[in-house]
Image: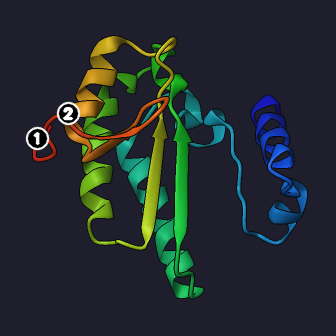
Amino acid sequence: MASLNRVLDRLHGENLDGRALIDQGILQVAPWSETYLLGGYFDSDRMLGDCTNIINRCSSAGTQRLLLAGEKAWCASGLPGCERIIHYEAAMDKLLRDFLWVTAVCQYSLSDIQAAVIYDNLCLHRYAKTTDRLVTGLNPRLEF
């Protein structure tokens, strides 16, 4: 799996043993085909449910900090449901308001994703990390 190898290489570059983190259950890496695009389409309710289950499982295990990260180039695939990405992001943002100990990082490639999707995300989220700085979202109260 190419994405796993990229993650492991990046962790290695930071002097972290990604395989050990996986073995300890600290790190989970899954391809789009097993998460966002399970069954060949994007279902925002399924993903929200999966994220809620992960959060609840971690909470029950006593986890005090959780980082959820998702690389979003899949939304440019044109597969069914991908057009609902902003609605998913808005629902995820709303869900996370109840879990202040969870940080979510949504990674959008400027070269892969349509400008309108990037703009809508900048409007939706309270903060955005650009190449060189953290900026306040354009409209942190916007609801989609």
- In the rendered image, which quarter is residue 16 located in? bottom right
Residue, x 88% and y 57% (percent of image)?
A: 17
What amino acid is at disc 1? Leu
Q: Are marks 1 and 2 in contact (CB under 8 Å)?
A: yes
Amino acid at dot 2: Cys
User: Residue at left 12%, top 42%?
Assistant: 143
Residue 104 position, x and y percent, is: 45, 53
Residue 15 in the image: above or below residue 60: above
Q: For residue 119, which numbered disc appears in the image?
A: none
Q: Is residue 71 left or right of residue 119?
A: right
Q: Relative to 142, is 114 on the left or the right?
A: right
* Horizontal arrangement in the rendering, residue 13 relative to residue 130 (left or right): right
* Residue 14 rendering spot, x and y as whole percentages: 80, 50
Numbered mark located on residue 142 in the image: 1
- Quadrant of residue 43 within the rendered picture: top left
- The residue carrying mark 2 is 123
- The residue sitting at 61% across, 34% down in the picture is 32
Residue at screen point 57% across, 81% down: 63
Image quarter for residue 140? Answer: top left
Q: Position of residue 106 (x, y in %)?
A: 46, 41
Q: Indicate the secondary structure of the residue bearing disc 2.
A: helix
Image quadrant in which the N terminus is located:
top right
Residue 58 position (above or below residue 6):
below
Callout 1 secondary element: loop
